[in-house]
């Protein structure tokens, strides 16, 4: 980012050629995403993460419970809390995360072979739990 503030119009006000919100700052990244998280419980030992649901539903799974977060809901998961989530087909949401987790996710997407995911998580102070 070049230091210019980003003011993104709502989805209804965007033209068809405008991209999803995607900004990587110095201390956190803000990205508009669709789709689910990894299918396994995992923990980030040093990083917090948050989601704001714009449309649809995210179903978060924790060690001891599952929680549905519908449109307008915000979910904050502090460092050290095991979690994963599944998105409904129509879900659209903002994810707010630090640069380390943004790099972790990029590396996971670049390595679709799940046999290497545990090693990737460890490099980013995170861990797969199942």
Image (spheres, rainbow, N blue to C red):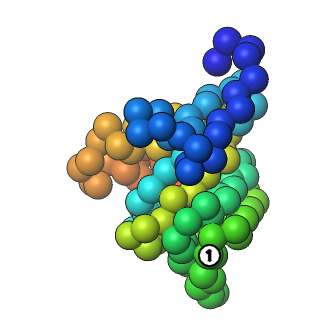
Rendered view: 128 above or below 9: below
Rendered view: 39 above or below 121: below
Residue at x 61%, y 61% (from the top left corner): 54
Residue at x 54%, y 40% (from the top left corner): 14
Q: Residue furthest bottom?
A: 65
Question: Which x, y percent locates residue 75?
Answer: 71, 66
Task: Tell whether 93 sits left or right of 73.
Answer: left
Quadrant (top left, top right, bottom left, bottom right) of the N terminus: top right
Q: Does any portion of residue 35 appear in the rendered image? A: yes
Question: Which x, y percent locates residue 2?
Answer: 67, 12
Q: Residue furthest top?
A: 2
Rendered view: 127 above or below 23: below
Element type at mark 1: strand
Q: Which residue is mark 1?
A: 70
Circle count: 1
Residue at x 41%, y 39% (from the top left corner): 16
Q: Residue furthest left?
A: 113
Question: Which x, y percent locates residue 96?
Answer: 67, 47
Question: Which x, y percent locates residue 44?
Answer: 63, 54
Q: Judge by depth and name the residue closer to the eye, 66 or 125.
A: 66
Quadrant (top left, top right, bottom left, bottom right) of the C terminus: bottom left
Rendered view: 42 above or below 45: below
Residue at x 44%, y 73% (from the top left corner): 88
């Amino acid at each position: 980012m070049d230091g210019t503030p980003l003011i993104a119009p709502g989805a209804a006000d965007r033209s068809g050629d405008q991209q999803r919100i995607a900004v990587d700052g110095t201390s956190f990244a803000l990205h508009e995403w669709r789709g689910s998280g990894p299918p396994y419980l995992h923990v980030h030992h040093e990083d917090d993460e948050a989601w704001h649901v714009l449309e649809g539903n995210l179903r978060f799974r924790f060690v001891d419970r599952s929680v549905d977060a519908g449109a307008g809901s915000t979910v904050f998961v502090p460092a050290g809390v095991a979690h994963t989530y599944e998105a409904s087909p129509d879900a659209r949401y903002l994810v707010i995360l630090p640069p380390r987790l943004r790099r972790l996710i990029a590396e996971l997407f670049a390595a679709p072979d799940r046999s290497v995911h545990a090693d990737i998580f460890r490099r980013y102070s995170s861990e797969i739990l199942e």
